[in-house]
Amino acid sequence: MARERAKTSVIGGRHRKGDSVLKATGQALYADDIQLPRMLHAKILRSPHPHARIRGIDFSAALAHPGVVAVLEGRELPTRYGIIPWTEDEQALAEDKARYVGDEVAAVAAVDELTADEALALIRVDYEPLPALLSVDEAAARPDVKIHEGAKHGNVSKRVDLAFGDVEGELARSAVVVDERFYYEGSTHAPIEPHCALAQVDGDGNLTVWSSTQIPHYLHRALAKVLGLPEKKIRVIQPFLGGAFGGKSDPFALEFCVAKLALKTGRPVKILYTREEVFYAHRGRHPMRMRYRVGTDPDGRLTAVDAKIDIDGGAYSSFGLVTAYYAGQLLTGPYRFPTYHFDSTRFFTNKPCCGPKRGHGSVQPRFAFEVALDMAAEKLGLDPIEIRRRNFIGEDVTTVNGQRIGSNGFLACLDAVERASGWKERYAQLPPGKGLGVAGSMYISGTAYPIYPNEMPQTGVQVKLDRSGRVTVFSGASDIGQGSNSVPAWILAEELGCAPEDVVAVVSDTDLTPVDLGAYSSRVTFMLGLACIEAGRRLRAQLDAAVAEAWKIPAANVEAALGTYREVGSARTLSFVEAVRLAEAKFGTLGATGSYRTQKLGGDYRGGTIGASPAYSFTAHVAEVDVDRETGIITVGKLWIAHDCGRALNPCLVEGQMEGSAYMGYAEALFEAQEYDHRGLHRGPSLLDYRIPTTLDTPDMKSLIVESIEPGGPYGAKEAGEGPLHPSIPAISNAVWRACGIRLTELPFTPARVLRLLREKEARERKLAATA
Amino acid sequence: MARPKRQIVALTVNGEAIEIAVRPHETLLEALRYGLRLTGSKQGCDKGDCGACTVRLDGVPVLSCITLAVEAAGRSVTTLEGLSHGPTLDPVQAAFDACGALQCGFCQSGMMLSARALLDHNPKPSLREIKEALSGNLCRCTGYTKILEAVQVAAGLCQPGEGPVDELHRG
């Protein structure tokens, strides 16, 4: 538990990131910027069929092609892997059958990329096409066509059915029941950096893999398992990473292929995915078909929530077990659910595999529920902000499914967006075609679930400090743009009383840095932060003791900030480097570690730990929209984003996460769809056809930080990187209802969909007028 | 398969006159990144959609992934590595740093060169003009807010943490 400081010198300031000058000048090296002597380039052959048995592969023409050095096929890497230890159903290259268009079948290493590409065209694969199941309905209807022979029930990847209280009884007794169906189309991360990996083997058989991964530790384990090498013989380095958003949190085929090809050839090997391959590698947001029944009492207080969710998982499990839980487990705040039931089923289909995208598993249900809540408010004649206030769950409470909530600034978030948007004055006054909408959400700050069961810390840091005055922190955390390379500098500067510039971070290199589980579940700042505080306080105790001894005063009378140590109530000072020299003389070589251990959290039932987090963040958005009735085009004029991040360790970075999240939700609402045709082909695997918003498409956004001070967080901090995505989508849908009286319950909100709903509404109104 | 022969191309890169040997199909981006090891320019799509590869050719921002290297013959190329003035950052770089506009940083090479090209011919652009000038550069991290602010800071229109300021709505 972090002790609260009355006053901070660094925390809370808008400090520059320690590595941003490297990025501004082009000195930061990303995976594809690394070139090694004698390096080969490899390419992966992908299945053109959505579902096909592989009867044989003929490499003879490819091997005869000048410049080809090696080929690789599935049986050379037979060991299955998968991010969740209970659902290991992936193979680096498909051996028996391909399960989606784009499934990896073979690889070629050659002297250059063009030669490798030419050689792919020379590989002959004998496929036997199998029936393709391209939707959850087809997957459910054809249990005889098993995509995975190991699946227990047909094509069910995971089913979770959990009930808390008498939902049916409460629904029957409710004054208002909303019963509505929703559909959330899948979307993908589309980081601007495509996946890239390189491998090199030294003369002693030590393997080094550089990869654009956000989970170096799990990749390290998976490489060892699949290659049959001890973990200590493998070094995984994550260079600078060009965006991830969850899209780089599985082990991918390219990482195993470069490693195996480097072992086979003795030469360094690189694979860089094309943009098209990135769309097929996917692991993005799951399509979900949802039915929600939401009951309230006459005052709008929730009585019961019931959800039935069908999840389209694509060809493999990935994080799907967790997705099926998160779809239900993460909905039970910021509102109090007296009773709750959800039944979610993830199906395998012959499409690229879905996985975790920013707001994993909970963005889709949040959209559905927040729209349903608005419908309840409408039936009751309640203001949409008021119904949310009335259902506030409170602070220091346990949710209906057993999750422990600490600090909760949701009411302050509602107040902030209400005030900033001028809601009270404008909500009822806007002209037809314009509207305001609100939505709220809750998200986890890390998870009590460490993916593979173990008693070891989820993260740790080692801090080295010497007479130069330089502080070096060794951190395994993955900076994916969010700033985890810089967070240790701010925290250690705060704790040690040095300047942030005095701290250098050595990061994400399994040979050099302690284990961190990776950049997912919004865990990094929370857990890394606490580990840094622990290490910093251990060192600070030595610094204070040495200075106190030199000054012959009690250690409690030593204070320090921004490079200066001073005696409380006196003018006596010492520089940080002098303090370090005193400590090094007194204690010998200086160093300390800090770690974060998983706490026992969650409900006492099967799956009760999934969704259990040491802290929860809260968000509220108001969206202002303008709907063009002629074209069906929705223009979002502004998004007000209020987010309770506990404490903003650096408000500039928190705002960056809020804006990036809100933008991504907005993009899913209006533009993006990861869709496939009847052959299983992506409808537009390019950054032109898959429309991500430009500067001209993106609405004005106003970030409003709310600080609730979480007792268990580092200086009170919670997450900021995923929560603020959620409310964008329902807030826009609810604003469109206010603007023109149509309920958008299917994503994305395309002009065609808006026009169709407007026409249907007009037809209903005409019919009503005719009968009147 | 037989490859067309390499040609010698004389050009200026970041103020330095150099000669490079390139095949006719090689893109300017490939020549810069893999030939000259100027890896500040990034490849995000390799088909002219994302803008991460933007460099300046005779001052004009171009997509180097759909520009052939041979087209640069006799011309002047500026990459991110040539944006700073010796050890001093260009105001655009300093502003991107100060405003927190650099999250993952991958798109920012192209973004900063587009911004510099805008400010060179329009030193006090409107917010709309900034959005138009950067609309060919996709960013997936920031939601653009901090980037727009950074360009305004580089232009002296606001301070870090204040923007982006929309002059139409100025009080």
Image: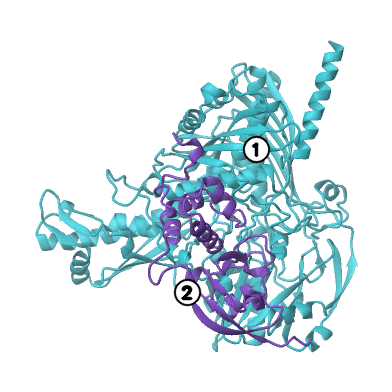
What scheme was used to colour the molecule?
by chain
- Of all chains, the one bearing label 2 is A
The spot of residue B145 in percent (x, y) is 51, 48
Which residue is under mark 2?
A511
**Which of disc 1 and disc 2 is earlier in sequence?**
2
What hue does chain B carry in this figure? purple
Which residue is under mark 1?
A635
**Vertical placement of residue A35 versus A386, above or below:** below
Which chain identifier belongs to the cyan chain? Answer: A
Mark 2 or 1: in front is 1
Q: Amino acid at mark 2?
A: Asp
Compute the Cα span from label 2 to label 1: 50 Å
Residue A530 in the figure: left or right of residue A189: left
The spot of residue A100 in percent (x, y) is 79, 61
Q: Amino acid at mark 1?
A: Thr
Camera-side residue: A708 or A705? A705
